[in-house]
Image (cartoon, rainbow, N blue to C red):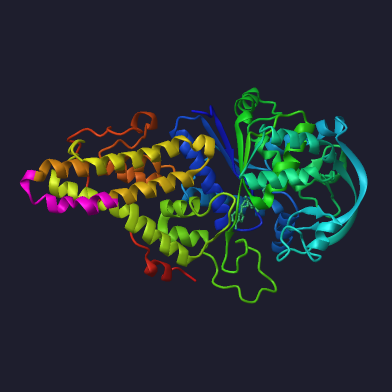
Amino acid sequence: MSRERFYVTTPIYYVNDAPHIGHAYTTVLADVLARAHRMLGVPTWFLTGTDEHGLKVQQAAEAKGVPPQEICDTYSQRFRELHARLGVRYDDFIRTTEPRHKTVVSRVLTLLHERGEVYRAEYEGWYCTRCERYFNDTDVQAAGGRCPDQPVLHDVARLKESNYFFRMGKWAAELARRIESGEMELAPEKRKNEVLGFLRKPVDDLCISRSKARLSWGVDLPFDADYVTYVWVDALFNYKSAIGYLSDDPAARERHATWWAHATHILGKDILTTHAVYWPTMLLAAGESLPRKLLAHGWLLDATGLKVSKTKREGVTDQGPPPPSIDALLDVLGTDVTRWLLATAMKPGDDAAFSWDLVRERVNAELANGFGNSVNRVVKMAHQACGGKFPGLGGGGPRGDSLREKTLAVVAAVSAVPETLDMLAVNAAVRVAVAEMSGYLDDEKPWKLAKDPAQTGRVAGILADCIESLRLLGLALSPIFPEKCAVLRATLGQPAATDFVAEARWGVLTAGTPLGEPPNLFPRFDDAKLAALPQ
Ligand code: MSP
């Protein structure tokens, strides 16, 4: 095992609106990776939470005429509820309005100020309230006078303020060296190149304050009461405050000492610069070590080819059908299938369209007719031909050897997850093995052979190969399908708890193990359920 520990984080979610499939994507990806590591015996700590300060929350509160904390409480709870529905098992949930976090932000800013890493200056620039950041003239011009990150959706306003700045530019070259040496890994490769390209150009210092005249909902700057902390500076420190950085509690500090060196941040490509430049330069300036790895995924896209988001697309007339909402997906397909749809929606680095049509196609082809059908078919035949018991391996012939090989490739892909963070490779290997099993059954036709008493041993050998393969596939996919794989395990007479190290080899099932009824693990997509949803 190459990784001794795994501390995995999601970005903390903004609380000015309800969660959508994009947020669910990041969380499910992190959860699947966390579960895979736990299954492999790697001690794991999984952190998620909500990002509760800043102008957006303040504006949402003003619009509703309620205190900002009330908005935070409501939406933070919505994220927790969504996580529960998605079967997400986190170890901690941090909220940036918690005292344990605000104290740390205040302490670290004092530290940076004392180290001379922060100075005061006049600043004039283009500000995007939705991204909560300044952009320079060149970038705004190139974006046609709009927000350079989201030109279609966000506009920018010219602002002039006296503010506090972090000497980010000073650390750019050092950070580039640490990325090039692999001390902080950036995946996929194209994101690493993007960040290195950014660091090669002159890097501006970072404005870390917001005047209270405009924005009061934030952590007070410890050295100037007229300002609050820029929400991104506040938010990024959640990854350390949550595990006890600069805490007064010795047990919390111990947790930080245990986990920080193993941090992997999962994030969307829209927040690459904040995570790959702002965050590590602040850590360097504070004398802290860098996170181990950043994994920046792409976006789920709607019918217009834009990032799925809650923002109304002003000026876009043909918006096409709306993408599935996360609640609708869960209502129609349940927890596990939703988890799988998200976890395997895209290769990290790429974007992927996401629509009901694609969902229907994938559920039917890959689950109902693929994996689910194999389970049903094999267990049914074992009931008919082998008295509902696992007949014991042997006698399957060369096709059986090939199925074993393809199945063990799945085990190898799972075992590589701590290195690769690639559950898509696991899923792909499962598909190859499932296809191999189908081919094996179609060619050998055990249901025909079963009619000939002389072939009983051969039939048993074929079905035994398939059952043993299904057991291993169920093991490999349990981080994605915790509930369905538990059903599969029970059907194959396995205990609920998995022990990957003991079970991840060919030949674990013992002859005579009674099999359960053939389950219909993955029903076909049910259009009636979709039509019955409230519009
Ligand atoms: N609050 C900041 C993160 C601070 S972390 C210190 C933030 N929040 S967010 O709620 O806007 O987004 C959280 C995550 O959801 C990001 O990783 C973002 O990429 C992801 N997604 C939001 N929409 C998405 C898609 N349409 N597709 C995939 N993920 C996207 O940014």
Please tell me which residue lies in front, 465 or 125. Answer: 465
Q: Residue at x 46, y 67 (%)?
A: 357
Asked if 304 appears above or below 264 in the picture, the reply is below
Q: Which residues are magenta?
A: 438-454
The quarter holding residue 189 reads: top right
Q: Residue at x 51, y 29 (%)?
A: 43
Q: Could you tell me what secondary structure mostly forms the magenta stretch?
A: helix
Q: Within the magenta stretch, is there residue 444?
A: yes
Q: Is residue 284 left or right of residue 511?
A: right
Residue farthest bottom in this picture: 317
Q: Within the magenta stretch, is there residue 378?
A: no
Please tell me which residue lies in front, 58 or 450. Answer: 450
The quarter holding residue 96 reads: top right
Question: How far from the left and from the top, in percent, is residue 258?
Answer: 60, 25
Question: How far from the left and from the top, in percent, is residue 297?
Answer: 60, 49
Question: How far from the left and from the top, in percent, is residue 447?
Answer: 15, 53
Asked if 115 appears above or below 364 in the picture, the reply is above
Q: Is residue 259 left or right of residue 326?
A: right
Residue farthest right in this picture: 122
Q: Is residue 480 visible?
A: no
